[in-house]
Amino acid sequence: MTNTLNPADSCIMVIFGAAGDLTKRLLMPALYNLAHSKLLAEKFVIVGFARTQMSTEDFCTKLSQEIQDFVQNIDKGIWDDLVQRIHYISGNFDDADAYQQLVEQLKTSTNRTEQTATISGLTQSH
């Protein structure tokens, strides 16, 4: 029996702490591998949210440089397609304006998934 995998449904993945180590070492290589295997939806979008001040263009440039260290033999066409789906919002975790920008970005999709990649101690447990 052959197990055929289907692409995921369209969604937005929000990565909190997107400028950090977990994103470059694990999340982006994993997302690239899913794209390479044709398992990401055509309308899959990534929204990075972090304290580091930079534009979406600068964030994508940073990711494009960093991915080289973690994925061998990158298909430029697949990577370029994935990068076109990335948006970046800079702001502190207590910045209401930054979260409003995030809300506006999320309005483009009814499905979303969240992955938290934050520095230990920034989140409070209740």
Image: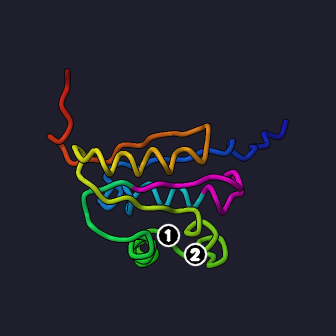
Q: Quadrant of the N terminus?
A: top right
Task: Give above or below for 82 relative to 13.
Answer: below
Q: From which residue to which does the magenta span run?
A: 34-48
Mark identifier at residue 74: 2
Viewer can see residue 13: yes
How many marks on residues?
2
Front-most of 71 and 61? 61
Question: Which mark, residue 71?
Answer: 1
Residue at (21%, 48%) from the top-left corner?
119
Label 1: which secondary element: loop
| Separation of residues labelled 2 and 1 (CA atoms) | 6 Å
Q: Is residue 95 above or below residue 21?
A: above
Is residue 68 visible in this depiction of the protein?
no
Outermost residue toward the top in this view: 126
Which amino acid lies under the numbered mark 1 shown in the image of this protein? Answer: Val
The location of residue 42, given as percent across then percent down, is 71, 56
Q: Find numbered disc 2 in the image and state the secondary structure of the residue it sits on.
A: loop
Residue at x 38%, y 63% (from the top left corner): 24
Labels 2 and 1 touching (C-beta < 8 A)? yes
Going by the image, does 27 lie left or right of 73? left
- Packing grade of label 2 (10 A; few <14, some 14-19, many >=20) is some
Q: Tell me the amino acid under the disc marked 2.
A: Ile
Magenta residue check for 120? no
